Amino acid sequence: MKRVGIVGMALLGLALCILLTGCTDQDEAFIQGTWIYAEPSVGGVTPQSSVHTNWTFARGRVEAHSCCDFRPGMTGRYRILGSEDDLLTLELYDLEGATDTDTLEIALLLNRTRESLTIQGTGPFLREDS
């Protein structure tokens, strides 16, 4: 009887692990690639008619660039802190470039229907054409 209980608990633990990481793996697979957002107006601050921001997620690496930022873009690594429904929370670390911090936590809202992301409340970011 004890043996069945231990085996049952092990199987339950394995099922939970697969279930939880399955969601995360799907979310991480969804964000892979380059995402572009174009702000239609910069309020007369610069002569450009729009600001383009790119985020690239590639197997644990992250890059972020903006066309009108005078500093270099930001590069580093990311890890998933949490995944609930369509909200993915990432920790960015080993950051270099346009940042004053070594780590940063960001929230991504995934919209699979529209193939878009909202990053830190800004968006929609659309997948770059390949």
Image (cartoon, helix red, strand yellow):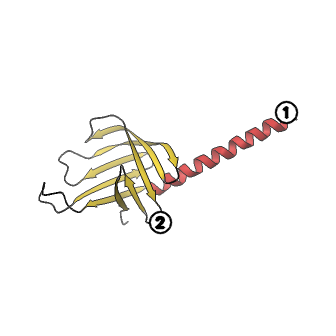
Q: Quadrant of residue 125?
A: bottom left
At label 2, counting other C-alpha atoms closer than 10 Å, the crowd grade (few under 14, some 14-19, many 20 or more) is few
Q: Residue furthest right?
A: 1
Q: Residue at x 29, y 39 (%)?
A: 96
Kind of residue at badge 2 = Thr
Q: Which mark is residue 2?
A: 1
Kind of residue at badge 1 = Lys
At label 1, counting other C-alpha atoms closer than 10 Å, the crowd grade (few under 14, some 14-19, many 20 or more) is few
Q: Nearer the viewer, residue 75 or 85?
A: 85
Where, quadrant-wise, is the N terminus in this rendering?
top right
Task: Say what secondary structure mark 2 lies in.
Answer: loop
Where, quadrant-wise, is the C terminus in this rendering?
bottom left
Count of all numbered marks drawn on residues in the image: 2
The mark that comes first in sequence, 1 or 2, is 1
Q: Residue at x 20, y 61 (%)?
A: 41
Left or right of residue 100: residue 2: right
Q: Quadrant of residue 78?
A: top left
Disc 2: which residue: 113
Residue 108 image position (x, y, % from top left)? 42, 51
Q: Nearer the viewer, residue 24 or 111?
A: 111
Q: Which mark is residue 66?
A: none
Q: Nearer the viewer, residue 72 or 106?
A: 106
Left or right of residue 45: residue 62: right
